[in-house]
């Protein structure tokens, strides 16, 4: 049995990277520092380094890279039940908050857990909101401002083309997000990014740098527009791009798509073959390479002189025995039956006719007005999901917008009963007072997104003949619920709701004013590895009023005092938890009592026979 205190820090990016180096080159990491000159030598490089190399650089790139590696403290994700739908049963997650902060909070829990990420970030057209990286503001000022400042005091402003750092500001926002996003992807995972001409070149270069040039999969051209813009000065712009990168292209595979009706028409059955419709394909190699050379004689004596064939002689004879060959003049054709066709391999040009639903029409149908200006069509995102995911996979979108990705996930599950899940993140930007969204009663973009999921879900359930998860747990980026005794909290005076200072009650020593036990548990679970926010959270009344089981193997005991009954009930749990978390204040300042309690718990567990099956860890807050 091991025990230690839970750290307030969630990520230690630098130490993780040093540990990776230590495993590969133990001699270059000494006393926690890296000998970069020695590392260059071991890699066969110039010890003096070199100032010239091929890369995209811009004002602020070094800071953007540091932003991805800096941990965040003092923040958590609180469950908001009023903003959720079926929170106790759903596996879907919706999060309100600054996307970079949220990704850092989730990184341990969702490390290598996401099969596909789709994002539709700002295109940097000159009218998009991005963060002002020179702006800082106090918490008092945040409380006085609305809409354009996030929980950490970052202001987002319109990035106008007249700015001398127009491209740099956009890159400074995207770079750290993509660096963190890569950690979420499974080895066989992929990321799809919508973009247009304004930043496609820069986005391609930073993705090559972050994901690796060898992991570039495709640049899809999406012909998104019906008709043309005759007011355009030079060319009528009718397309956007979809960049696709794999985490590891050697592990990534695309799914075949269903054959379209035009392709199906090419399959005929003129000879009434009982195996069904088929196409005829050539068996000979075109050109002088890529074939096997031999002469061939059919079973009825038809001789075909020496040439290059696509198949070995043995395979040709096998196909003839199976009545798959057709002899026409000097050529031999083979039958490919429609039931043998795995489907259509994805192509790099997508026409709007293949995902014809107009996104604005979808929004207008649901809300009676266009309450969101730049949505993507559901069938468009659904096509990506068909290509890159399978049953049970997790799909992430951290520029959620109108929540079209959630709709696409639910629609695909309706079609194939795939049980996929979504995890969405969206900054709660305010809707302008003069906007159609505000007139419809929506205060933020998140309000629109959540309501869209609810309305789309109702329609899906009416069509479904099998269970489809249309619910979601809503989490809101919030200040910490726990008094971690960090330097930031050391000189802070905590007040009750009535303005009075905290008393000496142990809850006031451990937790923040108004903190709910449920959210304290979630904050503790954000410091565990491989635990998703969709895991069930269960109160265990047989143990106490404030003891919870997260998932199936994490026990969180928030009881103010421990007694023998609590310990006995914990020892009887089956299966036994991997980890048990107690409050340090439950032991007061008595270290002997703490040791005695842990020994008693260990003895009780041994009596139940658990210790022979699995070790466990005890942690304290």
Image: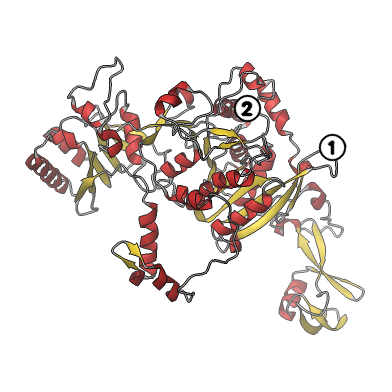
Q: Nearer the viewer, residue 49 or 540?
A: 49
Please say if 471 is above or below 22: above
Q: Residue furthest right?
A: 329
Q: Is 166 displayed left or right of 27 in the figure?
A: right
Residue 419 coordinates in the image, percent (x, y): 53, 41
Q: Nearer the viewer, residue 197 or 516?
A: 197
Q: Is residue 13 visible?
A: yes
Residue 544 is at least partly visible in this image: no
Decide: is 517 above or below 257: above
**Image coordinates for residue 262, horizontal then vertical, percent:** 82, 49
Q: Which mark is residue 257?
A: none
Q: Residue at x 45, y 50 (%)?
A: 66
Q: Residue at x 50, y 29 (%)?
A: 149
Colour mode of the rendering: secondary structure
Q: Position of residue 277 (x, y in %)?
A: 79, 56
Q: CA distance from mark 1 to mark 2?
A: 34 Å
Which disc number belongs to residue 229?
1
Quarter of the image for residue 439 reads top right
| Nearer to me, 422 or 292 | 422
Quadrant location, the C terminus:
top left
Q: Which mark is residue 459?
A: 2
In this rendering, position of residue 278 left or right of residue 66: right
SS type, badge 1: loop
Could you tell me which secondary element the residue under label 2 belongs to? helix
106 is higher (above) or lower (below) than 312 = above
């Amino acid at each position: 049995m091991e025990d230690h205190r839970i750290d307030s820090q969630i990520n230690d990016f630098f130490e993780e990277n040093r540990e990776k180096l230590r495993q590969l080159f133990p001699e270059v990491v000494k006393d926690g520092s890296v000998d970069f000159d020695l590392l260059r030598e071991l890699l066969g490089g110039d010890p003096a380094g070199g100032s010239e190399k091929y890369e995209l650089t811009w004002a602020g790139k070094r800071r953007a890279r540091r932003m991805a590696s800096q941990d965040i403290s003092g923040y958590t994700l609180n469950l908001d039940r009023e903003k959720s739908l079926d929170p106790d049963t759903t596996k879907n997650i919706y999060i309100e908050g600054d996307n970079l902060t949220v990704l850092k909070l989730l990184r341990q829990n969702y490390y290598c857990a996401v099969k596909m990420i789709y994002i539709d970030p700002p295109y940097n057209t000159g009218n998009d909101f991005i963060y002002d990286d020179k702006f800082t503001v106090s918490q008092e000022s945040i409380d006085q401002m609305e809409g354009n400042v996030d929980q950490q005091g970052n202001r987002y402003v319109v990035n106008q083309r007249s700015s001398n750092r127009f491209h740099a500001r956009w890159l400074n926002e995207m770079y750290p997000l993509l660096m963190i996003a890569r950690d979420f992807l499974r080895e066989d995972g992929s990321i799809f990014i919508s973009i247009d001409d304004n930043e496609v070149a820069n986005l391609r270069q930073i993705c090559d740098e972050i994901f690796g040039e060898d992991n570039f999969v495709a640049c899809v051209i999406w012909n998104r527009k019906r008709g043309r813009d005759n007011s355009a000065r030079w060319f009528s712009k009718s397309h956007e791009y979809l960049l696709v990168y794999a985490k590891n292209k050697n592990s990534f595979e695309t799914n075949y798509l269903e054959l379209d009706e035009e392709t199906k028409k090419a399959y005929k059955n003129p000879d009434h073959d009982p195996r069904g419709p088929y196409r005829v394909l050539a068996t000979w190699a075109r050109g002088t390479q890529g074939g096997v050379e031999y002469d061939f004689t059919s079973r009825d004596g038809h001789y075909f002189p020496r040439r290059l064939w696509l198949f070995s002689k043995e395979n040709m004879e096998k196909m003839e025995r199976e009545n798959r060959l057709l002899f026409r003049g000097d050529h031999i054709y083979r039958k490919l039956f429609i039931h043998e066709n795995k489907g259509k391999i994805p192509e790099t040009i997508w026409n709007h006719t293949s995902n014809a639903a107009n996104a604005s029409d979808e929004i207008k149908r649901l809300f009676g007005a266009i309450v969101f200006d730049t949505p993507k069509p559901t069938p468009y995102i659904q096509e990506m999901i068909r290509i890159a995911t399978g049953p049970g996979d997790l799909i992430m979108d951290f520029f959620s917008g109108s929540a079209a990705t959630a709709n696409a996930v639910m629609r695909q599950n309706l079609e194939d009963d795939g049980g996929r899940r979504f995890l969405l993140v969206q900054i709660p930007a305010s809707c302008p007072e003069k906007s159609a969204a505000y007139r419809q009663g929506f205060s933020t973009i998140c309000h629109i997104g959540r309501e869209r999921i609810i309305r789309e879900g109702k329609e899906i359930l009416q069509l479904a003949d099998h269970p489809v998860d249309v619910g979601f747990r809503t989490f809101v980026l919030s200040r910490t619920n726990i008094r971690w005794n960090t330097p930031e909290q050391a000189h802070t005076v905590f007040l009750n709701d009535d303005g009075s200072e905290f008393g000496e009650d142990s809850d006031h020593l451990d937790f923040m004013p108004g903190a709910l036990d449920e959210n304290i548990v979630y904050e503790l679970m954000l410091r565990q590895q491989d635990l998703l926010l969709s895991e069930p959270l269960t109160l265990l009344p047989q143990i106490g009023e404030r003891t919870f089981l997260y998932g199936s193997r994490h026990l969180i005991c928030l009881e103010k005092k421990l007694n023998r009954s609590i310990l006995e009930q914990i020892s009887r749990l089956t299966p036994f938890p991997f980890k048990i978390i107690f409050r340090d204040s439950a032991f007061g300042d008595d270290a002997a009592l703490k040791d005695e309690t842990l020994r008693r718990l260990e003895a009780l567990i041994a009596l139940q026979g658990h210790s022979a099956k699995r070790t466990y860890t005890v942690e304290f807050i």
